[in-house]
């Protein structure tokens, strides 16, 4: 919301512009003659009200002052256009409004019919209908209109308040007077607010949800009589609304439309701004992308609060309780967002995670997908947490409360586990070695003997249970045709926790690809690795390589390749081994020759020395006493 409002008061000479300003400042009519153009005045914020500083600028309509007039009009936020008789009223449409347009300014105009004391009170409705409404219909930039009298102090404060409100709570982005409808962007924003407040997603705001909405939006409780009044108004405006169940979306939109029609559009702005909307009806950048500092060699994961939020979302939107989110349920869940995250669309979601037999993402797959997104693109997770209405344990918590930063793991060779629950493993190997089939098996997909070459990088994510009941999320990624670019990118390698070198044990030329890969990219030696012989259910063949795989890994002081087949039930043991190696990286580096443990020898020598010293001291004392 704007915190500074600059009002430029325009109109013909003699319409009472300066008298209105003087009456505002003095709080009484100044009968003495005042100067034709008053100096600029600044009104500080009113305690207990909105923090808005208002500047009021008086102008002259004389031709010789036209340069100053143009300058002030271009500097202002809102124009108060004053007329006081038939001639000055005609000039509103014939001169002033076209003049504002010719200057290219796009600011609201408040139309002020001054000197109403000369026309009396009885014909206010007639003045509104005959004078103001036609000109407002012709010039959409006119925000509101009002009758005033500086002499009688009638609506003096109100006209300046209308000018301030035209800037701080503009009607233009919300309501289309020509169509008598809320504008589409406003409807979309209010629809999202309704979605976030409908906690049980039954399509109605029940009494408790209405009370919570009132407390969040207006920081005060909703009185019983106020709630009944809202229900009565909505029932009258939308007879089809089943108000006994609560306020539905149509009724909620109609209620806000009534606010706009009755000049209470500041109520709509209070609601929208409490839900982080800007004056352009977009969500605040700082709300979508709060500050998140991730140190080098650290990673991002969902916190317990984040996992709880996404789990609750899944359970709420799984309307048929079949353990999966179908297309309709996913569409309903992502309704307040721009849609699926772009990276999900690029990776053909939900093919990257666990699905049920119907092809719908399961709760396990849902949490795994968000774990992967948070690991690879924490900003995307933060953005969607904001869209979906995450609220932290404390009211002031930002969406970063749903994330946690892991400890940096620069020294991978240091013994011990790393503080990570989400790990990334690159699967490297020759074409047709079985990498894609391995990823499918990781997601419990049925075996497909047909070969499908991988062009773009492909990921699969699933949870793996480690020893002691600890669970982690493992991301397997095959690089496709981007393999050279990724392996040359040090940042990509730093993000990787483990390399899985996979070869086809039935193809004699498969292992040599791994040998050449390690020669071409020596930086891979800085990453922990596991060697895997795939297709172990087929006949094993001798590899056309200087060293056979077992001998090659032995020469590196590495563990021998694990022989597995995706058709075996034991394939899950490979995924556990990968996850264990990624979370305990020192175990997946070449074993070094350790010096013999001489601790016991040193302890024995120390004990002997102490005993000899003690015997010497006893002998010396006995000799001295003799």
Image (cartoon, rainbow, N blue to C red):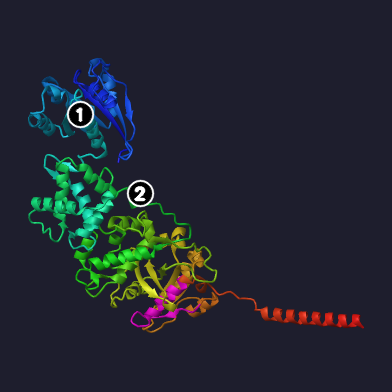
Residue 317 position within the rendered picture, expressed as x and y whole percent measured from the top left: 23, 66
User: Percent position (x, y) of residue 279?
Assistant: 27, 42
Mark 1 lies on residue: 101
The residue pinned by badge 2 equals: 286
Tag 2: Cα neighbours inside 10 Å, few (<14), some, or many (≥20)? Answer: few
Which residue sits at x=48%, y=68%? 418
Magenta includes 563?
yes
Q: Residue at x 33, y 28 (%)?
A: 42
Direction from residue 173 to residue 347 in the image, left or right: right
Q: Image check: 560 left or right of 121?
A: right
Residue span colored magenta: 559-582
Q: Secondary structure at mark 2?
A: helix
In this picture, residue 417 sits left or right of residue 155: right
Residue 312 seen in this snapshot: yes
Q: Observer-nearest residue: 76 or 517?
A: 76
Q: Horizontally, is 431 left or right of 246 in the view?
A: right
Q: Nearer the viewer, mark 1 or mark 2?
A: 2
**Distance (Cα) linking label 1 and label 2:** 34 Å
Which part of the image, by quadrant, shows the N terminus?
Answer: top left
525 or 313, nearer to the observer: 313
Q: Residue 620, percent across and down?
A: 87, 80
Q: Is residue 496 above or below residue 465?
A: above
Question: Residue 452: in sight, yes or no?
Answer: no
SS class of the residue under badge 1?
Answer: helix
Residue 301, placed above or below residue 10:
below
Q: Residue at x 44, y 72 (%)?
A: 501
Residue nearer the viewer, 294 or 342: 294
Front position in the image: 524 or 617: 617
């Amino acid at each position: 919301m704007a915190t500074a409002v600059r009002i430029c008061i325009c109109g013909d000479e003699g319409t009472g512009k300066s008298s209105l300003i003087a009456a505002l400042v003095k709080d009484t009519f100044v009968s003495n003659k005042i100067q034709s153009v008053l100096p600029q005045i600044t009104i500080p914020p009113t305690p207990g009200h909105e923090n808005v500083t208002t500047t009021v600028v008086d102008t002259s309509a004389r031709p010789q002052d036209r340069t100053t007039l143009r300058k002030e009009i271009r500097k202002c936020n809102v124009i108060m256009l004053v007329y006081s008789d038939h001639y000055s009223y005609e000039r509103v449409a014939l001169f002033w409004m076209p003049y504002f347009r010719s200057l290219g300014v796009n600011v609201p105009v408040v139309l002020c019919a001054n000197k109403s004391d000369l026309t009396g009170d009885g014909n206010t409705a007639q003045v509104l209908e005959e004078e103001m409404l036609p000109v407002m219909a012709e010039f959409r930039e006119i925000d509101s209109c009002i009758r005033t009298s500086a002499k009688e102090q009638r609506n003096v404060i109100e006209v300046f308040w209308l000018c301030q409100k035209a800037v701080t709570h503009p009607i233009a982005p919300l309501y289309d007077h020509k169509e008598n409808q809320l504008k589409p962007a406003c409807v979309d924003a209010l629809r999202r607010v309704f979605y976030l407040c409908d906690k049980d997603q039954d399509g109605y705001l029940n009494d408790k949800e209405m009370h919570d909405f009132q407390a969040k939006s207006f920081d005060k409780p909703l009185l019983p009589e106020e709630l009944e009044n809202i229900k009565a108004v909505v029932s009258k405006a939308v007879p089809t609304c089943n108000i006994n169940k609560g306020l539905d979306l149509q009724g909620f939109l109609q209620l806000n439309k009534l606010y706009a029609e009755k000049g209470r559009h500041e109520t709509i702005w209070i609601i929208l701004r409490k839900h982080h909307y800007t004056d352009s009806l977009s969500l605040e950048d700082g709300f979508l992308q709060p500050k998140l500092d991730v140190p080098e060699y650290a990673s991002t994961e969902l916190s317990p609060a984040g996992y709880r939020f996404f789990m609750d979302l899944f359970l709420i939107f799984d309307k048929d309780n079949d353990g999966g989110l179908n297309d309709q349920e996913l569409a309903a869940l992502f309704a307040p967002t721009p849609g699926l995250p772009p990276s999900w669309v690029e990776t053909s979601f939900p093919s990257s995670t666990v699905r049920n037999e119907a092809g719908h993402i399961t709760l396990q797959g849902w949490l795994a997908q968000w774990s992967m997104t948070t690991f690879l693109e924490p900003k995307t997770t933060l953005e969607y947490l904001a869209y979906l209405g995450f609220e932290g344990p404390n009211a002031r918590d930002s969406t970063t409360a749903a994330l946690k930063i892991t400890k940096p793991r620069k020294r991978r060779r240091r013994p011990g586990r790393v503080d990570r629950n989400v790990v990334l493993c690159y699967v490297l190997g020759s074409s047709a070695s079985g990498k894609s089939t391995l990823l499918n098996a990781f997601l419990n997909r049925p075996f497909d003997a047909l070969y499908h070459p991988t062009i773009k990088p492909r990921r699969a994510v699933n949870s793996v249970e480690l020893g002691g009941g600890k669970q982690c999320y493992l991301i397997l990624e095959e690089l496709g045709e981007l393999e050279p670019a990724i392996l040359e990118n040090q940042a990509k390698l730093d993000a990787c926790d483990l390399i899985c070198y996979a070869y086809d044990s039935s193809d004699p030329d498969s292992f040599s690809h791994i040998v050449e890969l390690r020669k071409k990219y020596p930086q891979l030696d800085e990453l922990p690795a596991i060697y895997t012989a795939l297709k172990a259910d087929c006949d094993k063949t001798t590899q056309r390589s200087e060293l056979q795989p077992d001998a090659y890994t032995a020469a590196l002081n590495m563990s021998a390749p694990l022989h597995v087949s995706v058709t075996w039930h034991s394939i899950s043991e490979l995924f556990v081994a990968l996850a264990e190696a990624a979370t305990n990286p020192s175990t997946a580096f070449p074993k070094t020759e350790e010096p013999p443990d001489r601790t016991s020898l040193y302890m024995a020598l120390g004990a002997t020395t102490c005993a000899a010293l003690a015997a010497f001291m006893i002998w010396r004392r006995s000799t001295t006493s003799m």
